[in-house]
Every structure is written in C-alpha cells, then in structure tokens.
Image (cartoon, rainbow, N blue to C red):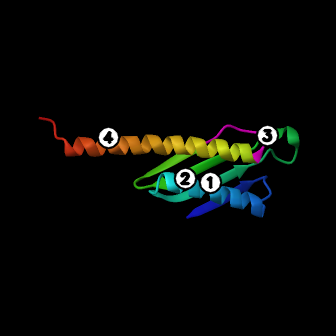
C-alpha cells in the first residue's frame, strides 16, 4: 500500500507511475514494507524558492523509517535520491534485525 502527497507539485500520470515503480523496487528489496507514504514538495510558485524535495515514510514490521533525499532541480532526480536513501535505511534495519535474531539464537555462555 502506498500513498502520495504533493506540495506545489502537479501530479501527473507519469509521475505517479514513476513513484509506483520506485515503491515496487523497494518492496522487491525488502518484502517487509507494509506501507509507504511519499511526499513530493516543489519549489513553490516561483522558481527561486528552492528545489524539489522528496520524503518517504516506510512502515516495516514494528518500525517506521523516514528517508529524505537531497533536494534537486529535477523531481525525477529528487525521487531517485530519496529512494536510494530509503534503501540504505532498509539495509541498516535488516542488518540490525539479523544481529538481534542471531543474539537470540546464540545465548551467551
């Protein structure tokens, strides 16, 4: 399940499709992703108000992970940046979970 929120970004079918492809990419990497909220923020009504920003909130078993990519002049580049940050966060979360499970299996003698 995914949700897209926009702030000063016109939602197009192509943009929604790009977000959906990226969400599916994350789900293939980490099948434990239960929910994904994507917030797309634009530069505002004037081009000098900044760059595009993308924030992700991922719900995985027992945790919420927030990932924010680097701001970019292109919404596509901002999307790619945020999803790569999210993947690294998911990798870290998987590593911690594996370590915790290993510690439970191997009691200290």
User: Disc 3 vs disc 1: which is toward the camera?
Assistant: 1
**Image quadrant assignment for residue 12:** bottom right
Q: Residue furthest right?
A: 46
Q: Residue placed at 48% from the left, 45% from the top? A: 90
Give the Cα distance between marks 1 and 4: 28 Å
Q: Which residue is mark 1?
A: 22
Circle 2 packing at 10 Å, graded few (<14), some (14-19), many (20+), is many
Element under disc 2: helix
Image location (x, y in percent) of residue 42 = 77, 47
On screen, residue 79 versus residue 26, left or right, reads right
Element under disc 4: helix
Which of the marked residues, 2 or 3, is nearer the chain's N terminus? 2
Indicate yes or no whether the magenta region holds residue 96.
no
Give the Cα distance between marks 2 and 3: 23 Å
Which of the marked residues, 4 or 3, is nearer the chain's N terminus? 3
Give the Cα distance between marks 1 and 2: 6 Å
Q: Quadrant of the N terminus?
A: bottom right
Indicate yes or no whether the magenta region holds residue 73.
yes
Circle 4 packing at 10 Å, graded few (<14), some (14-19), many (20+), is few
Q: Which residue is mark 3?
A: 73
Given residues 48 and 21, the one toward you in this image is 21
Q: Which residue is mark 2?
A: 26
Q: Are marks 1 and 2 in contact (CB under 8 Å)?
A: yes
Circle 3 packing at 10 Å, graded few (<14), some (14-19), many (20+), is some
As drawn, 17 above or below 53:
below
Q: Residue placed at 33% from the left, 44% from the top? A: 98
Q: Which residue is mark 4?
A: 99
Image location (x, y in percent) of residue 100 = 30, 43
Q: Magenta segment range? A: 68-75
Which of the marked residues, 4 or 2, is nearer the chain's N terminus? 2
Q: Magenta stretch mostly in which secondary structure? A: loop
Give the Cα distance between marks 4 and 2: 22 Å
């Amino acid at each position: 399940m995914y949700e897209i929120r926009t702030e000063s970004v016109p939602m197009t079918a192509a943009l929604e499709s790009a977000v959906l492809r990226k969400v599916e990419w994350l789900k293939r990497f980490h099948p434990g992703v239960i929910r994904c909220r994507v917030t797309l923020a634009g530069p505002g009504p004037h081009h000098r108000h900044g760059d595009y920003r993308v924030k992700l909130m991922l719900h995985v078993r027992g945790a919420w992970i927030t990932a924010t990519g680097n701001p970019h002049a292109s919404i596509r580049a901002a999307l790619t940046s945020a999803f790569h940050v999210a993947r690294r966060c998911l990798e870290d979360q998987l590593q911690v979970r594996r370590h915790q499970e290993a510690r439970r299996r191997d009691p200290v003698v």
